[in-house]
Amino acid sequence: MITEVGGTVGDIESLPFLEAIRQLKNDLGKENILYIHVTFIPYIKQI
């Protein structure tokens, strides 16, 4: 299962989704879960 939780982690709107993936870790076991944190790094090409 691949799940994306977008937005800012501190936003209150994402709390139900973060709680769901926390519970998924408890149900499946931490050895069966992989969290990947990705961030956007803007790149401005110089002329």
Image (cartoon, grey):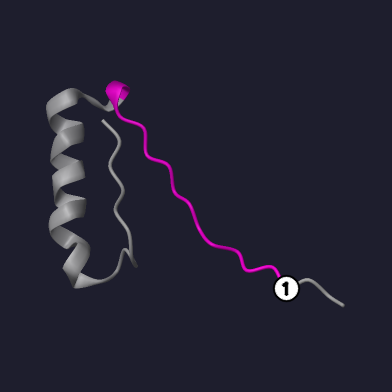
Write the residue at 63% across / 69% down: 42
Image-quadrant location for residue 13 = bottom left
Magenta region:
31-44
Query: Is 9 placed left or right of 29 in the picture?
Result: right
Q: Please identify the dominant SS of the magenta region.
A: loop
Query: Is 27 placed left or right of 4 in the picture?
Result: left
| Amino acid beneath label 1 | Ile
Query: Is 16 placed left or right of 18 in the picture?
Result: left
Query: Is 20 placed left or right of 40 in the picture?
Result: left
Magenta segment includes 40: yes
Q: How far across and down, in percent of the image, does residue 30 sit? A: 27, 27
Q: How far across and down, in percent of the image, does residue 46 sit? A: 84, 75
- Which quadrant: the C terminus? bottom right
Total numbered labels: 1
Q: Is residue 13 above or below residue 35?
A: below
Write the residue at 29% across / 53% down: 5
Q: How far across and down, in percent of the image, does residue 22 sit? A: 19, 43
Image-quadrant location for residue 41 = bottom right
- Looking at the rendered structure, the secondary structure element under dot 1 is loop
Magenta segment includes 11: no
